[in-house]
Amino acid sequence: MNIHRGPCRKEHDDHMPETSISSTLERIKKKTGACILAHYYQIPEIQEAADYVGDSFALSKLASELPNKLIVFCGVDFMAESAKLLSPDKTVLLPVSSAGCPMANMAGAEDVKKLMEKYPDAAVVSYVNSTTEVKALSHICCTSSNALKVIRSLPHKRIIFIPDKNLGAYAAEKIPEKEFVLFDGYCPPHEEVMEIDVKLARDKHPEALLLVHPECRREVRDRADFTGSTAQIIKYASQSDSSSFIIGTEEGILHPLKKENPGKEFHMLTGSFICHNMKKTTINDLISSLENMQYKIEIDAFLAKAARRPLERMLQVL
Ligand code: 13P
Ligand code: SF4
């Protein structure tokens, strides 16, 4: 599991001097016993303030293993919800309540029920980037780093994959022995990237390797040197003998890539590869979240019980 541990550092903020931010955070963390988790797409200041930085799989697993009773999840809602589902006795805070994932909200419980009626023999595999209601109807969850392993572990021949059609299509290419029913959801920032963007980036940086996230379209994945989750992209770039890379995922990943590989060059595949929801959380939001214990993730106990099962099944897949 790829997790980056980072001590709280002094960073700039519009409203507070850097020493004050750093000491304020340290003081509240000590007082509350909180652990701060941040996804690789968060702004660099948040990644530096976090105790752990990782991809969605590593962070949700870690949240359940940590001794801390208070977790602050700097990411988007489905990540904090997954952490709460796996750690029902902990308090999980999402610093910005409107930080959601547009792709997760594309699939509703009714859509899943209709597909289940149409294909009663199929296993429902939901990407963790889904609502709690959708998880509650699923056999098992997966993330972009373990989707292939999770699907291969199932005895079912037919797989209903929800909600990302691109990650689903990637899994279908890699696991041709199974039949896939794909929901028509997508991640807007990844879906926007086209074959022409690959051509332009390759022309500009002919020596660079192209590393992309499986949420990209097939026309982009087919032209990549490597496809993997955020953690897998970082691992690949760090272990590669190459020194130049074109990055096909959200630009927040540049921070850990450059930090781990000071001698290597990273170029974004497009100039605007940004998830605006991931960029909503500022240092002020993080401090305010800890000071005011906001925004607590609360999930109805009956729903939580059903949604926890597919997440736990995912964690059992080795
Ligand atoms: P990871 O599974 O790589 O963390 O990606 C999560 C995500 O939201 C990608 O858009
Ligand atoms: Fe959702 Fe895409 Fe943002 Fe990830 S990058 S949180 S999938 S909108």
Image (cartoon, rainbow, N blue to C red):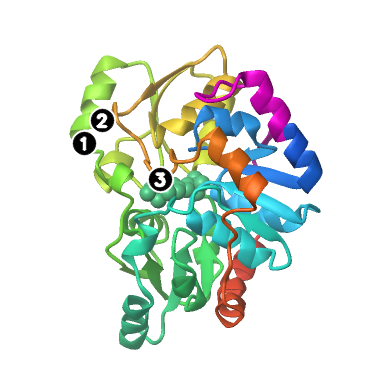
Task: Give me the C-alpha separation between circle 1 and circle 3.
Answer: 25 Å
Count of labels shown?
Answer: 3
Q: Residue at x 49, y 19 (%)?
A: 242
Task: Give me the C-alpha separation between circle 2 and circle 3.
Answer: 25 Å
Quadrant including the N terminus:
top right
**Residue 190 position by quadrant:** top left
Question: Circle 3 is placed at which residue position?
Answer: 277
Q: Amino acid at mark 1?
A: Glu
Question: Which class describes the residues within 10 Å of circle 3: few (<14), some (14-19), or many (20+)?
Answer: some
| Image side of residue 134 versus residue 241, left or right | left
Q: Amino acid at mark 3?
A: Asn
Q: Is residue 22 magenta?
A: yes
Query: Looking at mark 3, is its residue's CB closer than 8 Å to ligand 2?
Result: yes
**Residue 311 position by quadrant:** bottom right
Residue 81, label in figure:
none
Mark 2 near mark 1, Cβ–Cβ under 8 Å? yes
Return the disc, 2 or 3, that comes first in the chain's sequence. 2
Q: Residue at x 60, y 49 (%)?
A: 73
- Label 2 element class: helix
Q: Which residues are magenta?
A: 1-25
Task: Give me the C-alpha separation between circle 2 and circle 1.
Answer: 5 Å
Q: Is residue 172 depicted above or below 119 in this figure?
A: above
Q: Residue at x 40, y 54 (%)?
A: 101
Q: Amino acid at mark 2?
A: Val
Q: Can residue 39 be seen?
A: no
Return the disc, 1 or 3, that comes first in the chain's sequence. 1
Q: Nearer the viewer, residue 56 or 201?
A: 56
Question: Which class describes the residues within 10 Å of circle 1: few (<14), some (14-19), or many (20+)?
Answer: some
**Residue 272 position by quadrant:** top left
Question: Circle 1 is placed at which residue position?
Answer: 195
Q: Can residue 134 be seen?
A: yes
